[in-house]
Amino acid sequence: MKKFLILLISIVISILFIAGCSPSIKDAETHFDDIEPIQTGYDPGLKNVLVIHSYHKEWGWNIDTEKGIKEGLEKGGYVLNKDYAFEAFYMDTKDRYTTPEQIRMRSEQAIALIEEYNPDLVFVNDDNALKHVAVPYTLQNPDKKLPFVFSGINSNPTIYEPIDSLKEPGYSITGALERFPYYQSFSLAKRILKNRTRIVLFADSSPSSDFLAGAFKERYLEKVKDSPLDVMGIVQVDTFKEWKEKVNEYQDKSDFLGILTYHQLKDEEGNVVHASEVVLWTINNNKLPEIGFLQFHAEDGFWSAIGVSPLKTGRYIGEIGADILKGKDPGDIPIIDPKLVDVAFNLERSKMLGIEIPIDILGMASAAYLEIKMPRY
């Protein structure tokens, strides 16, 4: 008996050791490694709600959107753990699972999770979750008509077969578009610094950045005739070294530095440079006020951010979700840009730049950060 116990313990230790030493990329092939354990046997009186995030758990947009969803559901009459159970899955396709094969594997996991969890409603956050999960699931299971509600979508969702139009989606997918408020951002910056007239936009070279750059050209440069600031161009770079070179180059060519994306810059060995390193180098070597388009850009340390609010958008889609749980057909709910904007400033960065923000404009801010914070991702 004693020998048997020793043998059993040895086997268990070996299994744990092997599991602990397995490469993280293999996790994507075999495990649901980014979700909380799913409970079986929920109270049948509870609705099951699932949210599938395109990116990782620590991503600030995910955190705020999920918080907003729960607040929106509660406003619509659904209280967590009283009226519904909630689970989240993080595809982690920004930093960890980025190749087409890895994204496909994560999408398959998410779809398998839907089958296992049997939700009454699924929220999908950002483009990858819509494109690779909600759309294929709906096409593969047309009779189930599982409701999906999306947010953070930069693309035109009508490119996907299950969505007939923005006004009348027509099937089981609806949600909120994400459109950066460039005109408002440029106008507010111009109000603060009246003598500055030029802006250049910076981005990494990720697929999402390619889309943002293309959308900016199509939706802003080609349509807006009275831009508050003259756009000097869009600079996309692949490496952190190139980012540094271009930031230095534009110190005398522009008056503002527009920040689109900075999370996929590579070092000389091809590894992704942590966003905090990019921010800290930029604010210590750039003399131009930065304009970001998501609130956490200011939280990270850039001068300002005028952009889509994940918390408010989460509340908006949460209320849509509550209506669907009450029986409303998602195909009858128009897809719109709810134009829910946050204004944020980093006062420490403002001090570094020697800029005094007028009190009336500061009063408009959803947030004013007093320090340069480490990013929430």
Image (cartoon, rainbow, N blue to C red):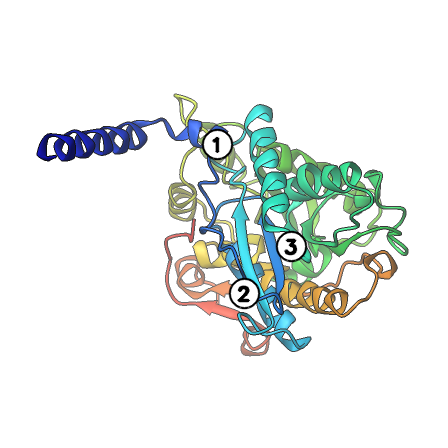
- Please identify the quarter of the rendering in which residue 110 is found: top right
Label 1 amino acid?
Ala
The structure residue drawn at horizontal position 18% and vertical position 34%, both measured from the top left corner, is 9
Label 2 amino acid?
Lys
Residue that badge 3 annotates: 119
The structure residue drawn at horizontal position 87% and vertical position 60%, both measured from the top left corner, is 332
Residue 80 spot, x, y in % from top left? 55, 70
Of badges 2 and 1, the one in the foreground is 1
Mark 3–mark 1 CB contact (< 8 Å): no
In terms of sequence position, does the residue under pointer 3 or pointer 1 come before the other?
1
Report the quarter where the N terminus lies: top left
Mark 2–mark 1 CB contact (< 8 Å): no
Q: Is residue 291 above or below residue 315?
A: above
Of badges 3 and 2, the one in the foreground is 3
Residue that badge 1 annotates: 28
Label 3, secondary structure: give it.
Answer: loop
Residue that badge 2 annotates: 67
Residue 100 spot, x, y in % from top left? 60, 25
Q: Is residue 22 above or below residue 259?
A: above
Looking at this view, is 268 or 161 the one in front?
A: 161
